[in-house]
Amino acid sequence: MPEPDRHFIGKDVPRKEGRAKVTGEARYVDDLQFPGMLYGVTVRSASARGLIREIRFGKGIPWKEFTIVTAKDIPGENYVALITHDQPYLADTRVNHPEEPVVLLAHPDKYLLEEARRAVTVVIEPQLAIFSLDDSLAKKEIIWGEDNVFKSYTVEKGNVDDVWSRADFIVEGEYRTAAQEQLYIETNGMIAIANPAEGVTVWGSMQCPYYVHKALVPLFGLPPEKIRVIQTETGGGFGGKEEYPSIIAGHAALLAWKSGKRVKIVYDRAEDMAATTKRHPSRTRHRTAVSKDGKLLGMEIDFVIDGGAYTTLSPVVLSRGTIHAAGPYHCPNVRIHSSAVATNAPPHGAFRGFGAPQSIFALERHMDRVARAVGLAPDEFRRRNFIQPQQTLATGQIVREKVDMDALMERAFELSGYREKIARFSKENAGRQRKKGIGFATFMHGAGFTGSGEAYLASIVQVEASAEGRVRVLAASTEIGQGTNTVFSQIAAETLGLDLDRIEIVRPDTGSVPNSGPTVASRTCMVVGKLVETAALGLKHTLTAAGLLAERYTQDEFAQACKRYIEVHGPLKSSSQYQPPPGIQWDDVHYKGDAYGTYAWAAYVAEITVDLVTCEVAVDDFVAVQEVGKVIHPVLAAGQIEGGVAQAIGYALYENVVWQEGRMINGQMTNYIMPTAADVPPIRVFFEERPYPYGPAGAKGIGELPMDGPAPSIVNAIEHATGVSIHQIPVTPEVLMQALEAVHA
Amino acid sequence: MPETPGKVEITCTVNGRKQSVHAYPMARLLDVLREELGLTGTKEGCGEGECGACTVEIDGQIVNSCLVPVLQVDGSNIRTIEGLASEKQLHAVQEAFLACGGAQCGICTPGMVMAAVNLLERVPKPTETDIRAGLAGNLCRCTGYMKIFEAVVRACQSTGVGA
């Protein structure tokens, strides 16, 4: 019998864990029950900033039945290990933001537990607090370090100071983006067992098991091998389960340590929205010098993000936002200065795009503004400045790929009918209450960790084969809905010429899988997938080198070879560790060089209707064209783009975090509005496939890309429809109404 | 203050099986399904009837089980995600979600599938507007809904809907 075709790359194979998900059999952390398990809750600060004077335990609660943990009960160090050790697991003497954890309670009855939580009062002597990045920059009060600044970067290219005198046009603008809640539908949760004899084991919803592991080691002062972190099925992350799960895991484990029992903490929606991270609010100022023929001469960009009360991941979010701030354009003179500053809000954190959606919103709004000032159509102005192969990006990175932004833009225009519509809508809108508009954005997104990040991570993947010829892939990369399990299976099966069901993706468990790095930064398919590919190749070479496998083989012959190898040599394993592609250079001090190994490139077009009476904006059609290398799984890849575009439509129009003294006061799905099935337009996704030599089968990263382009496309379209230039998101009806009134006043 | 009422006996049919539970009358149907009956396929996303992750059918009508006090289902016929597939075969909607990529992280999927099944039982040949309206009470943060719409269309083209 001839061997079947075993090519899986580029094919829509079934999602590995799909059946369990459509039947409801998939087990998420809140689905796990254990006899004798306690529930845990967190008592939080009601004040934004102040000194803890007293913790009062109210009457009417049988406190003796409760496990109570404060900072004093922490066996090791009281900080959340990430970048800077400034964030405590439990506030001890002072609080720096509302909702900061102060006391933990555990009890078997979760209803009584909720009453108990309400009966605890943390008495705080308030101090002056800072609630906006402007006040933080102005140092109205020093709330962090010496100057409220977590991190600053400066990117310098050419000499921007010399261009202003010879510019024909100088165009300035200021742009703001708001916080955004990740709003994964599964809230955060963890279960822990912890005692001195067995160490600490946690199960839960997370993106990065080794981040949790790294944080639990100092918290308990235990050797790393006594800490074990296991991912349960995870109901969405989008960055929101990158760093915060370390805190919940620590809290559950502290309660388990003190009680000697298994403890589960699952946040309800209100707590998840109020206490966990959101996308950093930002302010970007542009000053741009342009020649009369529409060439960029100089760009000066000042990019500031609000980091909240502790450092957390703000330095790296800032880094990505900084590097993307000048976009896919060639400009000989660029200065980007950026800062992440402290405010007394819960720390802002990772969210799909990681700083880039903020700076790209500003840039792509600004490019339309510059085009108008120069007297060119927005596409013609961009065309004259698109980056070409061998030119340099803002960090001085030479573009070695055959990027063709113009072709991507033209394809997006054809597919959306842009040219016809931009003329027709302008004509038809006159006198209408409902005005149509069309707008676009052209942009890029770097895949993988920034700069030297991947070399520093030095990720490892292992594959091992059983005597039956079944192959297990061991990595810490998590399936969070994006399709890790499926894509890794495709890569391993294709490389080894095996059926997909011969591949098992081992559940991420720091007790058994190597550290393949965090599941973030559009890196899982491209960087870790490449390690799966090379580790699988290594396995094959081991068998051929041992003389057990011919160049061409059947699946049965592979199984026999595995069996013989294991009989003679013992376990059959192969590991692969990250090696940077050749020629990659990065200077961390001057922020110069190859910021990313590669970029995904894209042109998005949004068609919208603005109702001048209700000031509502509806997105009617959305075209997303992108070059992402080889597409491994077309349905999953399109699913990533569609989902990202929908989130970004929410970012542009609906999702408005309302703050009151550092606290989110609309932390409910009732009044924090994300797009529903009734709101989304047809999202039409098109890929240009140009294989990237250093990705698995030629793939690049795509996960974050779709978050970058929709917001500026939509706001550019609003300007086309109404003639009103809006410089902030979300464009809620209130924002649009004010902008319209300002123009017509 | 009135005394907190004690637990009561509630009898209902769940996925075709008679069930008797001892629960507080105001306990959420969601909690009773998950904790008393072990039917954890029904998920909690928001606890306030906005997200639809806890969608189940009561006497043929879809509801958010986080908003239903269990007292109300005494004598009712309840269907949850666990009641759709037979041992051998998935429901056509489940098959279509698999084929079209309608499930990503999977947490909204049980509720979304229940809403889609209910829609197709009410409206066997839905228009796009019907599909959007029928699923508007179920939030999905992963897919942008496109693959879910495709799945509903595929399910109504295949046989076995309403089975």
Image: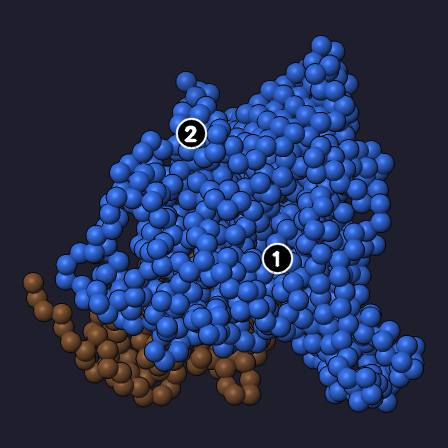
Chain colours: A blue, B brown
Secondary structure of the residue carrying numbered label 2: loop
Q: What percent of the width, then of the height, locates residue A627?
A: 75, 49
Horizontal side, residue A107 vs residue B50: left or right: left
Q: What percent of the width, then of the height, locates residue B88?
A: 55, 88
Based on the displayed image, in which of its 4 quarters is residue A272 positioned? bottom left
- Mark 2 Cα within 10 Å, few/some/many (few <14, many 20+)? some
| Residue to which mark 2 is pinned | A142
Q: Residue sitting at 42 percent across and 33 percent down?
A: A143
| Residue to which mark 1 is pinned | A518
**Is the residue A46 above or below the residue A290 in the image?**
below
Circle 1: residue type: Pro
CA distance for labels 1 and 2: 33 Å
Q: Residue sitting at 50 percent across and 57 percent down?
A: A218
**Is the residue B66 above or below the residue A147 in the image?**
below
- Mark 1 Cα within 10 Å, few/some/many (few <14, many 20+)? many
Circle 2: residue type: Ile
Q: What chain is tagged by disc 1?
A: A
Q: Camera-side residue: B57 or A276?
A: A276
Q: What percent of the width, then of the height, locates residue B133?
A: 44, 58
Assign the N terminus of chain A to one quadrant of the image. Answer: bottom right
